Amino acid sequence: MNSNKTRLLSIGFLLVALTLPAAARSDPFTPFRGESKPVTVEDVRPHIGEDGNATNEFYSEWWSFVFQMEDGYGAYAQFLLYNLGPGDGMAAVRTTLALPDGFHMNEKTVYESGEWDYAKDKFEIRLGDNVVGGPLDGLKIRLKNESFEAEYNLENIAPPWKPGSGRAHYGKSGKRHYDFQVIAPVARMTGRVKVEGEDEWRPVKGIMYVDHSMATIGMHEQSKRWLRFRSIDPKRTFLMADIRPPELYGDETIQYAVLFEEGRKVFESLDLDLGFGSRYVDPEKSGYVAARLVEMKHKEGDLKIHGAVKARKMTNREDFLAALSPAIRFVVSKFVKPIMYYFSGLYTIETVDKDGQKKRYKGNGKYYVTIVNP
């Protein structure tokens, strides 16, 4: 699984959903709003010690690192904090490394409270021998597990970005929310890896995308359906998402779209006019339908934006319940039944300024659809 929730996190959400009290239908919902503000260390540093998160069973926080590497290498990493299930203050690191000869390694290490730590005066998280930290436009990452160890140095091409305040509120209390920031929309990466059993380090390079998310509510209440598209390139990077909360929160959705060219932000939108088409109907699950075409319209000041995201080939399908035991699956399936669909995709966007000047942008990327409940 990629930059969104790992299976460990998703399964935890499913388990604790059984005990989550239902929100009142009158509860308000506030998606991302306002002009985007700079991302700060306080935004992305762990929040487990704030607002009762240390004992909130539904608190979870994760930092995802998506690599596009050269010379046949592939990688992914995620740092995760959570209280789900037995024990509070748990942490985990999930990593993958693919070698040019086709060999693929997956590692997941879980840490109990007291086995990990973070800095209070800067951005640095230590989970055992795994460390991420540094200035937000130039992170350094160190990974170490039974299969390999790696060191990666980042240099941002596009600056850190967040949609408005970066926080969407569920209900009146102010303590039920989903936070999101993009630490590196696109960054150059240089580093090295050493595979278990080898004496020499292998140099690696490429580009990376890094984001940070936090939720203080269960997965089934956070969203009913989640669409995401990500196209990462040093020349042009485009990110888009549309999160549909359950009906009890009304018709509003959490949205964002942002386009960077040569590291400069071309436009952003938190209020898209979306149209959906070309439906994929899951042949194995009744009621599960994923839009393979998303049309976008938006007017930002004097700039008009019109574009589309199109899914092409499906590359994976992940049923989160499949990893549960039959007994737990029987109970959990009465509340949530998430399935995630992975597609290769492309986007095209046209902008028109106040003088009628048109510009067109396009690129390839990854498109993800998660149906939490049909």
Image (cartoon, rainbow, N blue to C red):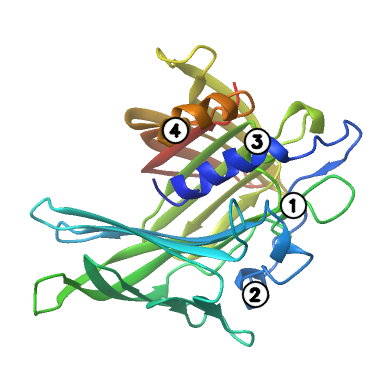
Kind of element beneath mark 1: strand
Q: Amino acid at mark 3?
A: His
Name the disc covering residue 40, or none. Answer: 2
Left or right of 64 on screen, residue 39: right
Which residue occupies the foreground of this view, 20 or 156? 20
| Image quarter in which the N terminus is found | top left
Query: Disc 1 versus disc 3: distance between alpha carbons?
Result: 13 Å
Mark 2 falls on what kind of element?
loop
Neighbour tally class for label 2: few under 14, some 14-19, many 20 plus, Cα within 10 Å: some
Name the kind of residue labelled 2 in the image: Thr
Compute the Cα span from label 2 to label 4: 41 Å
List the residue tagged with mark 4: 325
Q: Which residue is mark 1?
A: 177
Viewer-nearest of labels 2 and 3? 3
Q: What amino acid type should be assigned to the residue bearing mark 4?
A: Ser
Query: Tag 4: Cα neighbours inside 10 Å, few (<14), some, or many (≥20)?
Result: few
According to the picture, the residue beneath numbered tag 3 turns out to be 220
